[in-house]
Structures are given as structure tokens and as C-alpha cells.
Image: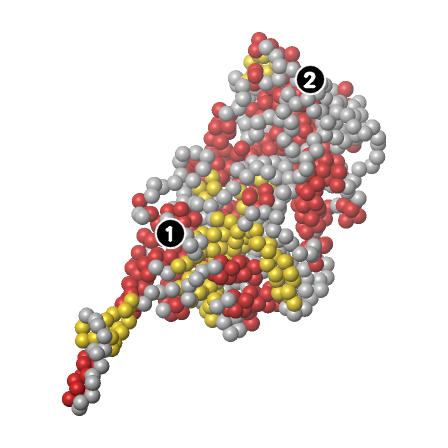
Amino acid sequence: MNVLNEPKSFAVEVAPIRDMLRLYCHALTERKVELQDLKQLVEKNIGWSRDDVATSDGIAIFLPAVIERFDNQSDNFDFLKVMLTQQAGHVEFGSFKFEFGRAATRFVDLRPKLAEPPAYHDHDHGHESHHEHANATDLTRLFRLFPNKRLALDIFSILESSRVEARVMHDYRGIAQAYDEMRRNNLKLRPEMTLLPAREALLEYLVRLGLGQTHGMKVPLQHKTIAQEMGEMLRLTLEPGATVEDAAEASLRIYTRLARINNDYLEKTEFGNFDDNSNRSNRPPGSKASIGSGRSNRWADQDSERSLSALPSLVGREREYLSPQGVDHRGDFRPELAQLLSRPEANSREQRKSLTAEELADLLRGQRTPKRRDSDDEGEEQDPQTSQMVQNLLREINRRDPRMQSMAQRPSAHDDNDTGPLTATQPNTFIYDEWDGFRSRFRRRWCRVYEKTMPPGDVDFYRETLLNRRGLLEQIRGEFEQVMPELYRKEKRLPDGVEHDLDAAIEAVTDFRVGITPSEKVFWRHHKIERDVGVAFLLDMSGSTGEAIGRLADAPGSSGAGPLFERAQRRIIDVEKEAIVLMSDALETIGDRYGVYGFSGHGRDNVEFYVVKDIAEEFNLEVARRFGRIGPLHATRMGPAIRHATAKLRQEQTRAKFLFLISDGRPQDRGYSQESSDKGYAVQDTRMALIEARREGIHPFCLTVDKEGNDYLRTMMDDFSYEVLSDVSLLPRRLPQLYRKLTM
């Protein structure tokens, strides 16, 4: 199979450039922003479900693993940049720092004047009772003012996403061109406004206006005044000095107007052209605009708004309203969930304790896709997953509370997540014990391992490693080919063979001359020795392997993105991958059975074990593609990963079995090695896992690029073989040497 001739993919993989993207976000926001795998957030089942667009939980930014929306790499990279910048903008420009009591800058505050509706539900009927609600966040308190949360959330999301987008384009002109292109692409895909019912057509007008469209929009003729007022309020929120509180105040006013409109379908003749005559695209952001008030940069409320004490309910059935089509480059914006998770310390623990499961379920239902327009059921949907999501969300909130994380821990500090033994409830999940060195006993059924096949990526990494490392590759191949003659042993003193055994023949002649019957075994022949070796390579894929160690070639599609996008960094994980690619090529030469696995995870209940190549799997193009997807992920819970690799090798019938652990540091994970006293726990469990492997007849070897590795490896490896590399760049050369030394 010729992997080198495989056509080039247009997809952009996030893992190889994650460190570069992290630097870019740090420069934008002037704070440390973690970039994580979107799949990780979705799998937590706490309210996010889309796995194809970026999002943020208020602290980290979550990105899809691969971007392949366009048929050229440059456009895919631009889409990734814009998605990432938009999420960084939400963090930088305060989308998740909304405060109910903080004054807006462009509007007179209506929030303090408004009363919460009698019942807080996603439908228009329910319990008619007033009682004090525990507010999970300030945004929760805001949304409780609206009788229909779905419409309120849609309006707020459009306004706030547009505000952040305008602010990014104003402050960071270098990214504006890419934004403009994404806006044009999205506008081409927007639904025809005349095909939407009246209320939804006006929301579509608001979306289009936020995307920069100024001409060619058709709105219901009878609601032209409302459309004009909505446009003026949107423009105020797009001014550089506007805040998230301005988006909230504009949402209150726009909701009041839209709620009173029947969401009926209209004839095309009932729509008319409506152009944004002020053409804000030609007006510099921040300039004055006449909007009919004494001060050009503040909204002048009507008398009815000044006397407003409560927001109106929707006219008509709620099921007659559907949310507008999303804007993918803006990502999946979940402001209330993000504020809940990013600011757990903002609400007292006693206040959080008073939150009921139903109140959190209400929050989650607000994130849910509404029913079809033609649904006959107006009652509250009974989602069987909601109760589980509520429990998951509560655990996540408590885990993130810095006060809980700083509480004094016992020597064996794992009770923060101590819910007892685990079970394997999903396919390809495995349960393992964990050794508690402080108590000298196993914690039974303590860790859950999820085995996943590494998704295929771009074959470029495999191909370029073979090409760029051609000199080293030929050297390794030569060394392994020299072993081939050693695989044949010269067997002497045989009764038949291709040639005479000189020593045996001389002895036979001597015996004959002295009258002794000579032996007939005077021949020799080469006997092929079949290698019978099985090996598992276990790669540490923790987040720390994303540490940069040097330069790589220019990142794809990086033109026009500024100096931070000009060059990618060579990372520890890239060197690990290079070593494994070269090692695999050598093993294919001599025919040893081998598997390549990676591991990471977060917590004892989510240890991720990635199969790059299973031991029984033939090397092919699919495997070559998987190498490109190996990248830094989360934590390093070594014990269960070693135990699962041991289980793999246990199934092999080879005479000799080896386990190569390649890591960049000590074992670390939540509840495994967070505190100084806890680090010994992780080391002792890892050591016990290695002992268990040896009992199965497996020879473990640890190769680390951690310069401080000797500090803990003396304990962890004690009477096992290990090596600490002083220079990570030596790994591709050293790994084949060690393999040959240990197995041949």
C-alpha cells in the first residue's frame, strides 16, 4: 500500500494546531483560555448537544476535532478562526459576566421595574402562584422576567452575539475580512423572509441586520415601525461601548413588541422592501446616529415602556413559534449555562442548595429544541434524560466551585467524587480496580475505561514524517534488517542437510579409524527462528504533551491571520507521534505483532483509551490516517490505562510480550494526584498496575521525556526498566534502539 500517494485532504484538524490557537486566544483575551475537545463537553450530558460548532462554558472554549465544511483548506481554516474568535470574544467582552443590578449604557433600565410572571414555564399555562425562586445565575433572574423564555433567549442570543461580533471586528481589524466572508456565506443560506410567519420574519430581519445586510430585506408591511425600532435598538448594542446589559435591555423591549404580534403566515403581497437607510456599514462604529431622542447614543423609551410593570405573554399558541436558523460561525451560544458553570462562587452554597431539581430542569428545558409547529401537545415535555442531566449538572457545578476544591483533603483524597463502585453501562466500557497505597488495599470496580477507535485524520502527518525523516528511517530499517540473519540458527550434527558439518565429519573419520562406529549425524542446515513477540505501545495524550518544543512548518491557511498564526509550534506529542510512525514502519519489516494506543481522560469514571492500531489489526491507510489525529487531551490516569493495555496483551498467544509506556510526566488526574500528599497515591497505583502486568508475563518499560522523571520513577518503576530522555527530540531515534535491545 502506497500511503504517500494518497490525495491531500482539505479538512483542518484542530489537534496539531491547538497550542497555536491557545496562544492566539491568550493574546486576544489577555487571560489563559483552555481549548478543549467539543466531544468531551457533549459527552458530559449537561446541556450541550451540537458537536459541529464551537461553544464556550464561560471558562474554556470547545472546538470540533475536524473542520471540513468547505472544499479548500484555507476556507476551513478561516471558519475555524472566526468560530474561535467569536467564542474568545464572548469571554473577553463579558457575555457571561452579566449582572442583573448593573446599569446599561444605552438604555434606561427596565429590569428593576418589572415583576416576574406568576409562573415560570416554557408554556403559557401552569401553576398560578407567586413564590421566591432561587436564581442559579443573574441571567436566570433576567429570563424569569419573560413569560416565554424561548423567544427571550432567541432575542438575547441574536443581540449579544451580534454585539460581540461587531466589537471583535472593530477592535481586531485583521480578522474582519474573514468575518465578512463568513457573513456573506451565511446570508446566502438564510431562509426567505416572505415564507416565514410574521413574528419569525421580524426575528430573521434582526439576524440579517446583525450579519451586515442593509438592503433587499422584506418585512410585514403592517409591522414596519416595529422593524425600524428593532433595527435602531440593535445598532445601539453594536456600539463599541455597549455592554451585555444593553443587550438585555434591548431584549426586554424587542420581546414586548414581538410578543404582541400574531405569528401568522402572510401573503407575499403583505411584505414590503425595507432597507436600513442609515447604512451602519458606512458609519464608523461608535459614531452618533439620530434615533429620535435627545441623546443620539441612548434609546428614548415610549410612554408605554416607561410605565411597563410586566412583560406580555405571547399572542397565540407557543407551538406556533419556532426559533430562527442559527449562524454557525457564531457557534452554540448557551449564556445561562455558561454563567452557571463559570461563576459558581457568585452564588452562595446555601443558595445553590435551595435550587430544586425542577428549577434546574427548567433551565435545561430552555436550552432544548422546541416541538414542531404542528404539534398538538402544549404541555411540558417529559424528557426522560432531563433528570440525569440535572444530576450531571449539579456534580459539575460542585466540582468547579473553588471553595470546594480548596477544602482540606485526607491523605487519600478521592472522596470528592466517591460514589462507590462503577458499572459498565455502555458498549466498549471496562471497569478496573485501583490500588490505594495509603490503605494497602484495592478499591474495587473503581475506574471506568472507555475504549474508542481513534477517528481517522489527515494522512499528511504519516506521509510527511516518512519523507522528512527519510535519513533516520533508512538507518532504522537498516538496523532492523541486520537482525534478519540472526533469525536463522545454524543447526549442527543432523542426519541430513545441505552441507557436511566439518567438525562432525572429522570426528566420524577419527572414530572409524579407531574402530568405533561413527555417527551418521554429519550434516548441518539453517533453521529459521520464528519471532514470537507481541507489544503494546501506550502513549500519554495528556494536555501537557501540547507543550511547544520548537518550530514546525507554516500552518495551513494562515495568511492574513497575524503573527500568532504565522507558524505552528512543534510539540511533545508531535515527537511522540513521529517516534511511533518510524517504529511502526520498522515493525512491519520484521513482522512483530504490535498495537498502538493512547490514553487520557478526566476523572476515575472517564478514562479514555484510544485504539490507533489494535494488535490483531493489519496496518492500512485507515491506520495511517489515525496517527494524524493523536493530540493532547486531558489528564493522565495511568493505572487503568496500563491495566487495559495488559488485558489486550493477555489475549495474545505470543511467547514474549512487552508494554512500552511513553509519557511526558508523572500520573495526574482529578482525585488521583491533585495534592502533594495525593501524588504518592497515583505513583503507587501505577506501580501496582505494572506489577500486575508482570504477573501476566508482560515486560513493562517506561520511557519518559520528563527531565524530573527520576524523582518519581525511582519509586514507580523500582525494579522495572525505564529511561529518562534529557532531550525529547531524541525520542524518534531512541525508541527503536530500545525496542531492538529489549526484544531481540
Amino acid type of the residue that numbered disc 1 sits on in the rendered structure: Phe
Quadrant in which residue 94 is drawn: top right
Around disc 1, counting alpha carbons within 10 Å, would you say few (fewer than 14), some (14 to 19), or many (20 or more)?
A: some
Front residue of 576 and 343: 576
Task: Place residue 684 in its image quadrant.
Answer: bottom right
Task: Please give the name of the residue rendered at 53% of the width and 58% of the height, measured from the top-left corner.
Answer: 644
Q: Which residue is mark 1?
A: 619
Q: Is residue 370 visible?
A: yes
Horizontal arrangement in the rendering, residue 94 relative to residue 62 (left or right): right
Could you tell whether 604 is left or right of 611 in the image? Answer: right
Helix, strand or loop status at disc 2: loop
Q: Position of residue 170 (x, y in %)?
A: 54, 34
Residue 460 at what x, y percent from top left? 37, 47
Residue 368 horizontal/vertical position (percent): 65, 33
Mark 2 or mark 1: which comes first in sequence?
2
In this view, the residue farthest toward the right is 130
Q: Residues within 10 Å of mark 2 (few under 14, many from 20)?
A: some
Q: Secondary structure at mark 1?
A: loop
Q: Which residue is mark 2?
A: 261
